Image: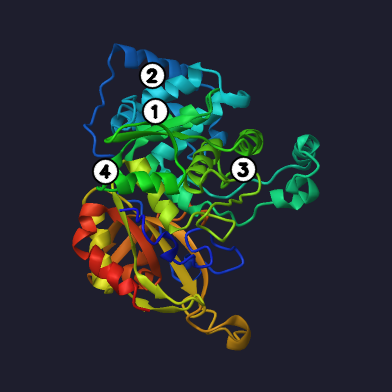
Amino acid sequence: MVQAVGLNSVPNVNGISAYRNTDEPSLNSFVPTSTFQTKPFVSSPLILNTSLNALDRQKYIYLLTFMSNYPISNNAEGLSCAKQLELLLKNGKLLSRSKNDNTTTLDNLYSIATKKRAYDLDQRNLISNVLDVLVNPRVVSQTFGDIPYQEKERILSFLPNDNPVKINPSLMDVTASGTCAAASNEVNLADKYPAEYARWVSNLSSEKKVLYLDVDLSSISKNTLEAINILNLLEAQIVDFNFNKVRIKVNTDNNAYIRAKIQDKYWDDGERNVANVLVQSAIMQLGSQNTYNSLIDARKGKFNSNSQGLIEIEKTFVESLIKNKEITSLVYQKIDDNQNLLGYNCSFDKMKKHIKDTIDNGDDVIIGYVLTNETSGRVSSRYYNPEVDGKPNEIISGHEITIVDYKYDADGNMIFVCVDTDDDNKNFVEYSSDWLLEKLHHAGYPAEIVAADEEEIMNNSKVA
């Protein structure tokens, strides 16, 4: 459940669920990783449909023709669009249906192809972007593309003189982006809800530039009044309401389309594609009380003192709305006011069980981890000075990644299979469970998976 009481009790651990400073070490810097490609993503739990009816066949053939000359070099997966469509048809993702409006992935791809896009975004690029992500959600990136000089000059020409970017153009030069929580939600959306992902891209890139989510109030809280309170606290844009469901308007900020147009023309492999830009910007808006600025990757809002990213409470709120499912976020670490890691609110075995049970239930687990001076490897460096660099257990950075599977090594030790949207890696990465669990700050789970342990962990978290 998204907690309505004590929202500010969740520590903002140096932007823990917001971003990873590229000057700081990442998980990949300190543990050997390997690719894991033998087990594919689990598709969304929908009836597998691989047979085209007459109307679907017309749309399928139209898309094949429309994308027939699209260059493979522009495709992050290196596959022709025809091959990608074939793969999605065979694995059931092409004809799976959106939970929100019952459209299929194919319907939404066809809509992109046949209806004008906002700001003349390239329809074929958008379709290719969606196909890339649905075939391989690991290509989702949070890396902002560089803005060519001539584009910067054009942007500055129409900004008012009092705009911060006009005063300081370097604000546009985003390096370490804060969209890791948004990108992790995008991975989960594409993996488990392919038609819904295609609908997000189709609607956000349309001339109306808006998306609507129909959400059960029970997915926010079983208590109706508490659910309403949470929606108001997080400033969701409610356009229709009854005591069972709520319709929420989702849109990006206008600067997202500036970023999208640049990526439409200047995208490089490893950067966010246009679909990534639109989906991540919309998620950032939804979580940050509609305060996100895509041009400079900064947000305001009432819950986050850091200008980047989403904190745990905001990320959980967005995750609940996307999945239309009650998500409980468990905070596993005890952290003092000086950002020192003091201990844990439950055993590693219990953390491991929560993750395993969720994966077995057919879902992914979006987690926030932290690195301290010690766990980052700084303490072992001959340059480490505790008087300057802080205590060994002082938290220095945080990041969000997605656990999509688990396996066991030859000795029976559990290995987590993960997607990191900030590691420039299109493959899975693997971490031993014990190694990752000591860094695990929080994770979101379907409420029923962790109901038996939620109260105990919350009570333990109050003792620091």
Helix, strand or loop under label 3: loop
Residue 168 placement (x, y as % from top left) = 78, 51
Quadrant of residue 10 within the rendered picture? bottom left
Helix, strand or loop under label 2: helix
Depth check, front residue: 289 or 312: 289
Q: Which residue is mark 2?
A: 60
Q: Residue at x 30, y 41 (%)?
A: 217
Reply above or below: 221 against 157: below
Q: Which residue is mark 4?
A: 218
Residue 81 placement (x, y as % from top left) = 46, 29
Q: CA distance from mark 2 to mark 4?
A: 37 Å
Would residue 231 be visible to someone looking at this image? yes
Reply above or below: 288 against 345: above
Would residue 40 be visible to someone looking at this image? no
Find out whether the residues at labels 1 and 2 contact each other: C-beta distance under 8 Å: yes
Q: CA distance from mark 3 to mark 1?
A: 23 Å
Of the residues shown, which amino acid type is indicated by label 4? Ser
Q: Residue at x 63, y 38 (%)?
A: 255
Q: CA distance from mark 1 to mark 2?
A: 8 Å
Q: Residue at x 51, y 35 (%)?
A: 251
Q: CA distance from mark 3 to mark 2?
A: 28 Å
- Of circles 2 and 4, the one toward us is 4
State the mark number for residue 268: 3
Quadrant of residue 452 within the rendered picture? bottom left
Earlier residue among tags 4 and 3: 4
Q: Which residue is mark 1?
A: 85
Depth check, front residue: 237 or 368: 237
Earlier residue among tags 3 and 2: 2
State the mark number for residue 321: none
Helix, strand or loop under label 1: helix
Of the residues shown, which amino acid type is indicated by label 3? Asp
